[in-house]
Image: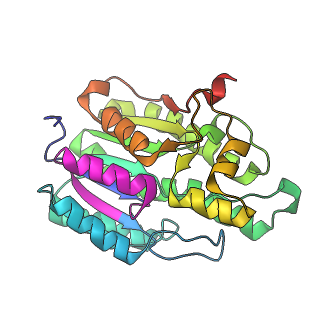
Amino acid sequence: MAKDLKGKVAFITGAAHGQGRATAIALAKEGVHIAAFDIAQTLSYPGYELGSENELDSLVQECKSFGVTCLPFTGDVRVDADIDNAVSTTISELKRIDILFNNAGICAYGLAHELTEKEWDIMLDINLKGAWLVARRIIPVMIEQKSGVIINNSSIAGLRGMNRLSHYAASKWGLTGLTKSWAIELAPHNIRVISIHPTGVNTPMNDGLAALEGLTPKEVAERSAGNLINVPWVEAQDVANAVVFLVSDKSRFVTGSQFVLDAGLLTR
């Protein structure tokens, strides 16, 4: 257990399953209290299953088994009132927020000229604007504390173009820009900001995308990735391990950086 993390508080969006859940559990094992925020329902776009209330409830119990508190919040990162309620309640009950993992996000395929305006807006509003709305509420807390770490979950699509994913790539490049800009703004307050860029990850989102394409998850991963290391994807636990490292004192001088977890894909 990393002694520097014990007793800290992490606010995680998209926490019910996938990368958010894996990270919540990994941090809980380190003694970090969790504020778990998730929409806990399926949206008409992209249409595949997102997190659920049952998953949020089971996450609370799993975190408790490690001796930490987990506060569950059902809300939408596009709705400021939902965020404000969750942040205010977290501060009231846990007194601080040391870590923000901006993880909530969606992905869907479509040629740029065939996307509807609604599809474009939903993608950008959840993946990019949502991250800003959440951070806008938490940054003042961190400034008052004079410390904090923000991890923005981007993608390899935040560092390159990708076929039939222009709206997704735009949202993830936006997170990369936010990361660098926030790092400049927040360094005087001892707040670090980092973006993480995984290749394809073995999560329910991966399964949902495959179903939309009429393919198996492995077929989708192999079509879109091309990792140098001979794996179709990385695991959610790999992302969680990276986040634990990046928010710990082992990375105390890392800020404004892009942590690439791509199995070598971007080297091609």
Q: Quadrant of residue 95?
A: bottom left
Q: Is residue 163 magenta?
A: no
Colouring rule applied to residues: rainbow
Residue 7 in the figure: left or right of residue 86: left
Q: Quadrant of residue 240?
A: top left
In this rendered view, identify the residue nearer to me: 190 or 63.
Answer: 63
Quadrant of the rendering where the C terminus is positioned: top right
- The image position of residue 244, as x and y in percent, is 31, 39
Q: Residue at x 32, y 68 (%)?
A: 86
Q: Residue at x 60, y 70 (%)?
A: 48
Which portion, as a residue range, is magenta? 14-36
Q: Is residue 255 visible?
A: yes
In this rendered view, identify the residue nearer to me: 240 or 75.
Answer: 240
Q: Say if 47 sits above or below 243 in the image.
A: below
- The image position of residue 139, as x and y in percent, is 36, 49
Q: Is residue 26 magenta?
A: yes
Quadrant of the rendering where the N terminus is positioned: top left
In this rendered view, identify the residue nearer to me: 149 or 211.
Answer: 211
Q: Say if 176 sits above or below 61 in the image.
A: above
Q: Residue at x 36, y 34 (%)?
A: 192
Residue 145 in the figure: left or right of residue 86: left
Q: Say if 16 sits above or below 190 in the image.
A: below
- The image position of residue 106, as x and y in percent, is 59, 60
Q: Quadrant of residue 143?
A: top left
Residue 15 in the figure: left or right of residue 77: left
Q: Say if 254 sits above or below 108 in the image.
A: above
- The image position of residue 232, as x and y in percent, is 60, 41
Q: Residue at x 73, y 44 (%)?
A: 223
In this rendered view, identify the residue nearer to me: 227 or 259.
Answer: 227
